[in-house]
Amino acid sequence: MLVTLKEVTQDALKNHYAVGAFNIHNLEYAKAVVETSYEMKAPVILQISQGSSDFAGLEELYMIARHYADKYAIPVVVHLDHGKSFLRCIEGLRAGFSSVMFDGSSLPYAENVAITCQVVEAAHQVGVAVEAEIGKVGKSEDGASTEADDMHYTAVDEAVRFVGDTHVDALAVSIGTVHAMAVQAAHLDIALCRKLHEAMPTMPLVMHGASGAVDEDVKQVIQLGITKINIATFLQKKAALAVKAMFEQTPDAIGFRDLAKPQVQAIKDGVRGKIELFGTANRA
């Protein structure tokens, strides 16, 4: 059943667990993520990034995600990830997304606030939740670096001010993760997360770039207000390695289903592990 981001993150905040936000790129990804979540009775967030929607189509991916949201009796959020403009977020609202993110983390504070406010006003009029970002997570260039040139840790006072200025429903913060990490080597700033949560105890916090985060640190920040955890690179790596292993065993395979089946199983295994880590099982 389709729900908003606010619904699942508020429950997660109250009960000290986090909801996995898994990026999907096609039907097979969506099917694998939702079927596994249903098997584990876990709420889930299906994320569609600007890159994936540019490639496969925003409305097309939304329709796939919405199909699986309607098919299974668990809470499913269909979320526009990293909308880079007001127009992109409006396109998400028009398509039917139940949650949108405006990512103004590269903009000056005043501009980030101004556009976020426009998105919030438009989204709230149609009952859709809004996520925004203050600070900047940054991106790993080699898949292993735990630092990035564009990385900027979230300042507590600025985060409090931003929430008051924008009235967002969830806040993405930078506490040590980096986008596109293919190894789990990023240690989180637990003390900073605690300060952010203490300063904004009713605000669901979001962790981007979590594929590279160390599991023990993830467990700690879930107790400190992190209620939505984004996973993309981790599943893509598992899917790619599954196909590689299949070709090593069956080098002449050419059938689409032959290629898809090991990926689907790898994605399911990955999602299952993250649901267990995040404490989301039996929360639906």
Image (cartoon, helix red, strand yellow):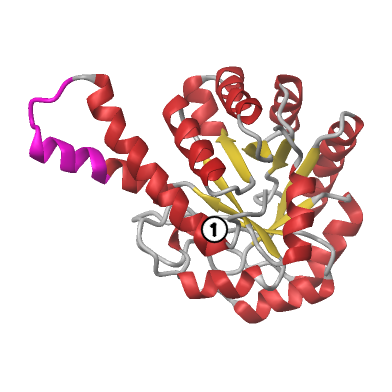
Please report the bounds of the magenta region as a residue range. 241-254
Is residue 27 shown above or below 77?
above
Q: For residue 2, what is the image quadrant? A: top right
The answer to if 249 sits in the magenta stretch is yes
Q: Quadrant of the N terminus?
A: top right
Q: Main secondary structure of the magenta part?
A: helix
| Residue at x 70%, y 20% (from the top left corner) | 95
Q: How many marks?
A: 1
Left or right, 268 with reference to 259: right
Is residue 186 shown above or below 242?
below
Residue 28 is situated, as x and y percent measured from the top left of the image, at 42, 29
| Residue at x 91%, y 58% (from the top left corner) | 164
Identify which residue, 200 or 220, lies in the foreground.
220
| Residue 83 in sight from this viewpoint | no
The answer to if 159 sits in the magenta stretch is no
| Residue at x 23%, y 38% (from the top left corner) | 243
Residue 255 is situated, as x and y percent measured from the top left of the image, at 21, 19
Is residue 161 shown above or below 265?
below
Q: Which residue is mark 1?
A: 150
